[in-house]
Amino acid sequence: MTRRRIRGKTVLLGLLALSLLAGCSTNPVTGKSELILISEDQEIAMGVEATPQFEKEFGGPVPDASLRAYVQEVGQRIANVCDRGNLEYRYLLVRSNVPNAFALPGGQIFLTAGLMSRMDNERQLAAVLGHETGHVCAKHNVKGMQREMLKQGLITLGGEIVGAGDTAKKAAAVVGTMVTLKYSRSDEYQADDLGIKYMAKAGYNPYGMVELLSVLLSLHDKEAGSLGEMLQTHPLSSKRVARAREAIQTGYAKYRETAADPKAKRFRQMRARLLKVVPDAR
């Protein structure tokens, strides 16, 4: 190989390294450097832009302002103590009777009437909102979207999102598949851990996470068909329930699993209200 070719290759590798370095950022949860090509502004914009599509797909907002405000209030308590508190989180309660919850990049978090109707208390609600907030804070959905966009050639190593003509439509389509984004087992465990941390910091008994996962596991045995999409995107097992319990026993020993939820009555009143405006939610 000639000196010129060696020098050219060195320059090319140097430029590539600079491009990758330009896209590196510190994960707000782990403190580690990782390759994130989608900026926070882009993340937020894509999530906001995709929200109306998802609201429509899941039957639109639940037609009760008090219920929507209640879910936002519980979610905001989580948002106030999470690792990306600079984002403007929206916790959206939608009419679908299919049990599900998911997060778009940037803090747009959806909860279906079908899932809320199957819970028993407010700490379980805080658990699911904490879990989804965890996905946003750890950028699990951003990294999933980034992988798909790189695969399709819709984003450059410099972080530039291609936005002209058909490519813009394809990029929007990638965001539109976020509800079916399959999280890895490690992502789910991390989101559980973050949800537990945020619940405790927000004043909730973190055993709500164990209760929530147990409810979902029970639903899997009774009505697996209706939980199909949620279980595909959020893998669930008895091991995951046991792991959440162990995490709480290790890190949050002051809490008791048998303690009653002081906000359970308020939650049940809201659940009864939900079943009046969305009677097929359960």
Image: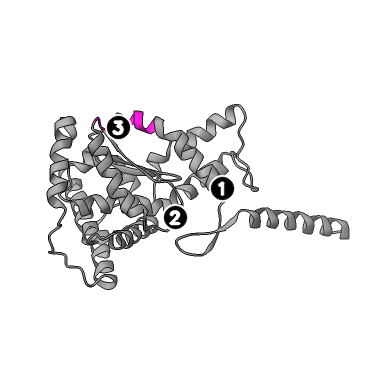
Give the quarter of the figure containing the C terminus. Answer: top left
As displayed, is residue 242 above or below residue 275?
below
Residue under the image location 73 percent in, 54 percent down: 15
Residue under the image location 45 percent in, 45 percent down: 106
Q: For the magenta stretch, what is the residue range?
A: 53-63
| Three-letter amino acid code of the residue under disc 1 | Ser
Is disc 2 placed on a helix, strand or loop?
Answer: loop
As displayed, is residue 59 above or below residue 110?
above
Of labels 3 and 1, earlier in sequence is 1
Point out which mark residue 96 bears.
none
Of residues 238 and 136, the one nearer the viewer is 136
Q: CA distance from mark 3 to mark 1?
A: 29 Å
| Three-letter amino acid code of the residue under disc 2 | Arg
Q: Position of residue 132 (x, y in %)?
A: 35, 50
According to the picture, the residue beneath numbered tag 1 turns out to be: 39
Q: Position of residue 29 (x, y in %)?
A: 44, 61
According to the picture, the residue beneath numbered tag 2 turns out to be: 84
Give the quarter of the figure containing the N terminus. Answer: bottom right
Residue under the image location 13 percent in, 63 percent down: 259
According to the picture, the residue beneath numbered tag 3 turns out to be: 61
